Every structure is written in structure tokens, then in C-alpha cells.
Image: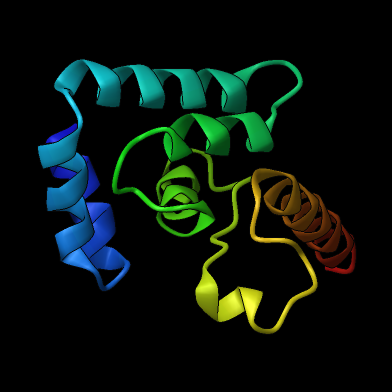
Amino acid sequence: MEKYIRAVCRWGNFAGVGGRVINNNTASQIQDAFVGAYAHLTSPTPNVSAALSRLNNLYGLGTPSFASKHLRFLKPSICPVYDAILTDKLPYPFTPAGYAEFSADCQAIATQLNMAK
């Protein structure tokens, strides 16, 4: 799990976030958060808001920004990245509910694009 967190944070251009998460949460807390988030994403009715909330409970991972980056790698078909760059340009709140709205809109756009092939 530690390698995954460090790799995603490095990919997101803030490698130091990974160290903060690992140093300020127990291995059990990290595992529980990621297992819970993944369960929300892979349930028959996926819940990206609940998945994001699970990761937001970890100290140092950030609000939607870095948590959404981790979700993106767990379930890319339904989890977009939602970070500060996008919040400056898009109308969605920087909250789990806003992330869920953004995810739903991204999925709708993807469906339309796939149908236009």
C-alpha cells in the first residue's frame, strides 16, 4: 500500500503528500480506508462520494484532490481526478457530493462520446 500511495502522489506532482499520509496514519487506518473506498466503488451501485469520504478520513491525503487521484487509479471508469486546478474552472463544490456530481457528468459525457464512434 505504501508504494501505491507514494507512486500516486509522485504522479500528482506532490511526492511529499505520500510521506505525510504514511507517517501520520497507521497501516491499519490506511488499509481500512482503501478497502472501504474500493468496496464503495465496486458495489452493485458504486458510490464515489462515499469512497472519497473514506479516503478523506486519512490525515494528509487532502480533500478531494489527492483522494480523487487515488480513486482514479482504483476505478478509472467512474473516478475522475478533481483537484484545485479544476475547481477553479468548474462549478462543482470541492466536496464529496461535488465530486459525485462531477463523476456523473464525466460518465455521461463518456457515454455520449462512445456512442458517437
Where, quadrant-wise, is the C terminus in this rendering?
bottom right
Left or right, residue 90 beside residue 51 = right
The residue positioned 80% from the left and 50% from the top of the image is 104
Q: Quadrant of the N terminus?
A: top left
Return the x and y of residue 76 as percentages of the image width and height. Answer: 54, 48
Q: Position of residue 47 (x, y in %)?
A: 69, 29
Taking depth in this image into account, of 63 and 81 the one nearest to the observer is 63
Q: Residue 117 or 86: which is nearer the viewer?
A: 86
Residue at position x 40%, y 47% in the image: 70
Tell me the residue at 68%/52% (across/down): 99
Q: In the displayed structure, does residue 49 sit left or right of residue 62?
A: right
Residue in view at x 17 percent, y 37 percent:
24
Q: How many numbered circles does the render carry?
A: 0
Coordinates of residue 80 in the picture (x, y in percent):
59, 56
From the viewer's perspective, is 76 left or right of 3? right
> From what the image shows, is residue 45 above or below residue 7?
above
